[in-house]
Image (cartoon, rainbow, N blue to C red):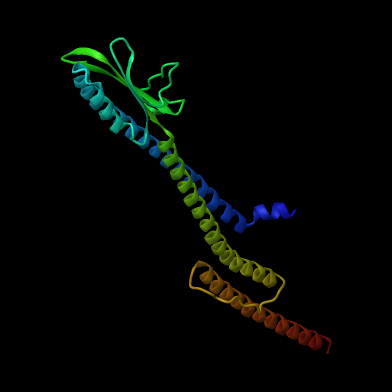
Amino acid sequence: MKSAGLFQSLRFRLIASVVSIEIIMLSLLVWNNISIIQTTHADRLRDTATSMIQQIARTSGNYMVAVDYATLEAYLGSIIDYQELSYLVVLDRDEQAVLSLGKFPAQPCPVLEEHPAQVRDGVFDVSDVITVAGQPMGRVLMGFSLSLMDEAIRKSRTRGISIAVGEIVLTVIVTVLIGLGLTRRLGILAAAAQEVGKGDYTIKIPVEAADEVGRTASAFNYMVTEVSNRTRQLEAAEAQSRTLLAENRNLVHT
């Protein structure tokens, strides 16, 4: 019975409705923000990888034509320190490794992906052909670790969820306070109406504010006053009628 009364309570329905809407809207907002963040980071990594590998392929071709592998190694050594770069490999025409830097898996050869969203092993593998004067000289293979991107996404997700939870808690507190204030005054109105129904016309409701509930309280007080006056007038009229009736009976008997 208490459970049924709780669900029928205006206070409970008000708080539950507001909190439910807040949770749904904030969940959609957080999910949408996370989706945007993931897409932004993935597109940024793809564009970075494409730009870097094209530049490296052009530069490596010049060194390979000159058979200057020492300078090529020094050039690539300055690039391998890039935070997200996991490995960098230069292959010749025979698909043999000329230079290999970083954590390049020997076997099997990495599966190349067109977008970080396709990655399943945590490394975005890309490749570009090395050409000189339109002639292929080999290939460049590069792998970009997704760990930094995943960490950035995780932090953004945690921050978004924390903000959403904070907003939900704040909404619950504010809604409870408003609901308690509103339903308390409505409860006073309901209790006063019950007393009037029992015949107590002396009751007065305090008007705490000039809002809708306050105006309702004022109207209720006015109504009770009018009903009380009319009731006294009716009682006085009835008493006078009874007196006249009694006097008429006495006159008839005499």
Task: Give whichever of 165, 67 is nearer the camera.
Answer: 67
Percent position of residue 81, x then y: 33, 35
Drawn side of residue 9 relative to residue 75, left or right: right
Percent position of residue 217, x then y: 56, 72
Vertically, is 182 above or below 241? above
Percent position of residue 215, x then y: 51, 71
Task: Give whichever of 146, 140 is nearer the camera.
Answer: 140
Farthest residue to the front: give it. Answer: 70
Task: Give whichever of 220, 149 is nearer the camera.
Answer: 149
Farthest residue to the left: give it. Answer: 133
Q: Which picture quadrant has residue 145?
A: top left
Q: Residue at x 21, y 16 (%)?
A: 131
Q: How many marks?
A: 0
Q: Is residue 142 at least partly visible in the picture?
A: no
Q: Which picture quadrant has residue 239?
A: bottom right
Drawn side of residue 217 relative to residue 252, left or right: left
Q: Which residue is drawn at 72% across and 71% down?
A: 198
Drawn side of residue 3 relative to residue 157, left or right: right
Task: Give whichever of 39, 197 is nearer the camera.
Answer: 39
Vertically, is 4 above or below 151? below
Q: Is residue 84 at least partly visible in the picture?
A: yes
Percent position of residue 62, x then y: 19, 21
Farthest residue to the bottom: give it. Answer: 254
Vertically, is 93 above or below 82? above
Vertically, is 53 above or below 239? above
Farthest residue to the right: give it. Answer: 253
